[in-house]
Image: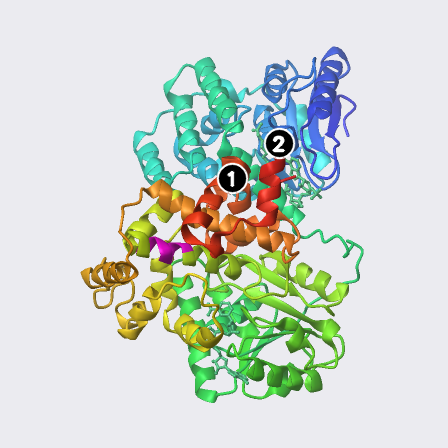
Amino acid sequence: MSDNVRVVFIDNPPVNGLGAAVRTYLMNELERALADEKVEAIVLSGKGKMFSAGADIREFGKEPSFGTPSLPDLIDAIERSKKPVVAAIHGVAAGGGLELALGCHARIATPDARLGLPEVTLGIIPGAGGTQRLPRLIGIKESLGLITEGKLIPAPKAHALGFVDEIASGDLMSAATALASRATLRRTSELPVADDPSAVAEARKAAAKSRGFEAPLAAIEAIQAAATLPKDQGFRKEREIFLKLVSSDQSKALRHVFFAERESAKIPDVPPETKTKDVASAGVIGCGTMGGGIAMCFANAGIPVVVVEGDASALERGLERIRGLYESSMSRGRISKDDFDKRMSLLSGTTDFSRVSQADIVVEAVFEEMLVKKNVFEKLDSICKEGAILATNTSSLDVNEIALSTSRPSSVIGTHFFSPANVMKLLECVRGTETSKETIASVFQLAKKLDKVAVLVGVGDGFVGNRMLYAYRRQADFLLEDGALPHEVDQAVVDFGLPMGPYAMADLAGLDIGWAVRKRQEATRPKHLRYSTIPDRICELGRFGQKTGAGFYRYEKGSRTPIPDPEIAALVEGVSRELGIERRSFTKEEIVERCVYALINEGARVLEEGIALRASDIDLVWIHGYGFPRYRGGPMFYADTVGVKKVYDAVSRFHVEQGEWMRPAPLLERLAREGGAFQG
Ligand code: CAA
Ligand code: NAI
C-alpha cells in the first residue's frame, strides 16, 4: 500500500454502527490525516463483516453527548476535505453507512457488497444527506426507486447506476489505495441535478398504495428538494423531515419491529451454541393447499423436497398447481426460466412413503383430523431415519398428542405455516412438552434459510395467531349484531392498515370449514357466553364465500371483488331484531377500537399463559401472518402507543356491555394499574 494513503477503519462490531464514539473517532482521524503532511489521500473502510450498516438505531431519540459530531457534520467535513477520501466498501453499506460513502470523493466496492438506503423501512428518511447526494449521482428517478423501496442492491448494479465508481476485482484495499492515489476532489453535493416531475408523480402514486405509511411520501419530498431548492435549503429540508419522523409513532413502531425480528430467535433456554441439524433434504406429506406451498418454500431455498400424497390424482393436481404458480411467477418476471427449471427439478412427488426415509425433515400437511395425523406420524416413525425432524403443520391440534404417537417425541415439533405458505413470512414453531432444544434450534435455523420469520409458541388451541383471530372475529360479529354491516367493519379495518377486513378474508378462506367445526362444538359450547349466529345462518344459505360466488358479500362471476349484498344486510338486521338489539351506527374509530382491543386483550392472555414468550413475538405473528400494519408495530406495541390504561378502560366498558368474552385479561389490568407497558 502507498505510504501516502492513510487508511481509516470503522471498527464497531457487529455491523459498524455509526454511534457517537465512532463518529468522534472518525472526525479525529480525519483531522489527523489532514494535518499530516505525508498523507495525500485517505481510504475509509470497515473492519469485520461490512463497511457500515449506518446509524446506531438504538441511539435514535437520545441526545448525543456534548462535543460529538453529528453524522451530517462528519460527512460534510469529509466532503470538504482538501485531500481525497475514498470509501472502500465490502459486505454492506446501508443507511448512514452509504451516506458516509456518498460524502467521500469516490467509492469502490467488492462485487458481492450490497448498498442501499433502507431508512424508510424504519419509518424515517436518510437524514445525513442521502436524499440530496444520491440524486446528484444517479438522478431523481433512480433515487426515488432506491430510497422509497429501501432495498439493498448488489454493488455491480450500484456501479451501473453510477454511485459506485469501481468494482474491485482483486484485493479491495490495494485497489482502494490505488484509486485514492489518483482520485480528484469530486464533491457530490456540488454536482448539478435536474428535476423529474413525471418520475416524482409516478413515485407519489406508488407510495399512496402503502396506505397511511408516512415515510415514503416524506422521502419523495426530500428527494425532489434536491432538484428544486438551493443546495443548503435542500439539505436543511431533509434534516427537518428526518428529525420530525425520527420521533414519530410510526418510526418508533418500525424500530420496535426491526429489533423484534432479531429478538424472536433468542429463546431463553435454547442458547445460541445449541447443536443444530442441517436440513439438506425434506419431505412433505400431503400436496393440498398447504403441502404444495410448503414444498415450494423448500425448493425456493434450494432444498430438494419429496411430496407424498395418499391419493394419486390429488398428487397430480397438487403438482400441477405448483407448476402453475411457478409459471405465473415466471410470466410476471419474478423468477427467471433458470429459477423455474431449478425449482421444478428440486421437487418430486410420490405416493410411496418410503421415499422420505432419508429426509432430514418431514413436514406433515394432511387433513386437520387427529386420527389421520396420528396414523401419518406412526408411519413416519417407522420409516424415517434417526435424527430426522418430524414436523406438523396443524393449525389447532395438540402437538403433544401427535408427538406421543411416535417413539421419538423429542424430534416432533409444530411448524405452522400461513397460507399461502410460499408467500407469507410467518412460521409459528410449536414447542411440545418433549420437543428437544436441538429440534427447536434446527427449525429456527431452517426458517432463516426459508426466509421465514420464526416465532416460538406453546401448545394451545389456535396457538397465538389464530387464537387471537377468533377473538377479533367474535368482536366483528358482535358489531354486526349491534348495528354495523360487513363492508363497514372491513373498510374501517382496511383504513387502519390491514390488507383486508375480517369478512373479505373469511369469504376468501371459505366459510364452510369453520361452520363444520362450530357444528361439532355445538354440544359443548358454553351457553352463557354470547354467540353470534350470523356466520352459521350465512352458511345455511349455501353461501361459503368466494368459492360459491357468495358469502358475507356477493361476487360477480369470475370476479373476486366483494360487493355488499342487501340480502346479507337484511339477514344481519333480522338477527339484531330477534335479539332485541336496537341497532346503532359505529364510527370507524369505534370499529377499530372494538376489533383491535379484542386482539390486544387476547394477546395479553396468550402472554400470561406463556403461549408466547414475549409481547414482541405476538406483534411479529400479527404482522407477518395477518398483515397487521408494520408501521403500527403489531397489536401489543399499538396498545403501548395508545396507552395500556386507555385500552384497559375501553375493554372494561366492553366487558360491561358484552359480558364475559371481554373480561379484561389480568395482565392488561395489572399493567394499567401500574402504568406499565407491554414492552417492559
Ligand atoms: N443500529 C444498531 N444495531 C444494529 C443495526 C443498526 N443500524 N443494524 C444491525 N444492528 C444489530 C442487530 O440488532 C443485531 O443485534 P443482536 O445481535 O443483538 O440481535 C446485530 O446488529 C446483527 O444484525 P443482524 O442480525 O441483522 O445481522 P445480519 O448480518 O443478518 O444483517 C444488516 C446485517 C443487513 C446490516 C442488517 O443488520 C440491517 O439491515 N441493519 C439495518 C440497516 C439499516 O436500516 N440502516 C439504516 C440505519 S438508519 C440511518 O442510518 C439513519 C441516517 O440516515 C442517519
Ligand atoms: P387440503 O385438504 O388442501 O390438503 C390435504 C392433503 O392431504 C390432501 O391433498 C389429501 O389428499 C392429503 N392427505 C390426506 N390424508 C393423507 C395421508 N394419510 N397421506 C398423505 N396425504 C394425505 O388441506 P390444507 O388446507 O392444505 O391443510 C393441511 C393442514 O394444514 C391441516 O392440518 C390444516 O389445518 C393446516 N393449515 C391450513 C391452512 C389453510 O389456510 N388452509 C393454514 C395453516 C395450516
Q: Quadrant of residue 202?
A: top left
Horizontally, residue 216 falls left or right of residue 581, namely: right
Can you tell me whether the CB of the residue at mark 2 lies under 8 Å from the nearest atom of ligand 1?
A: yes
Tell me if residue 476 is in the magenta stretch: yes
Quadrant occupied by the N terminus: top right
What kind of residue is marked 2?
Gly
Residue occupying the point 71% across, 22% down:
26
Magenta part, dominant SS? helix
Which region of the structure is painted magenta? Answer: 475-480
Check disc 1 and report the residue beneath it: 121
Tell me if residue 55 is in the magenta stretch: no
Residue 523 seen from this side = yes
Check disc 2 and report the residue beneath it: 97
**Whole-number angstrom distance, CA of label 1 to CA of label 2:** 16 Å
- Circle 2 Cα neighbour tier, 10 Å, few/some/many (<14 / 14–19 / ≥20): many
Q: Quadrant of residue 385?
A: bottom right
Q: Nearer the viewer, residue 487 or 631?
A: 487
**Residue 336 at x, y = what percent?**
46, 61
What kind of residue is marked 1?
Thr
Horizontally, residue 291 falls left or right of residue 589, namely: right
Report the number of numbered marks. 2
In the displayed structure, 503 sits above or below 527; it is: above
Would you say the residues marked 1 and 2 are in contact, meaning their CB atoms lie under 8 Å apart?
A: no
**Residue 28 at x, y = what percent?**
74, 17
Horizontally, residue 404 falls left or right of residue 625, namely: right
Q: Quadrant of ligand 1?
A: top right
- Colour pattern of the rendering: rainbow
In the displayed structure, 342 sits above or below 611; it is: below
In the displayed structure, 200 sits above or below 392; it is: above
Residue 112 seen from this side = no
Can you tell me whether the CB of the residue at mark 1 lies under 8 Å from the nearest atom of ligand 1?
A: yes
Q: Compare marks 1 and 2 and give the one earlier in the sequence.
A: 2
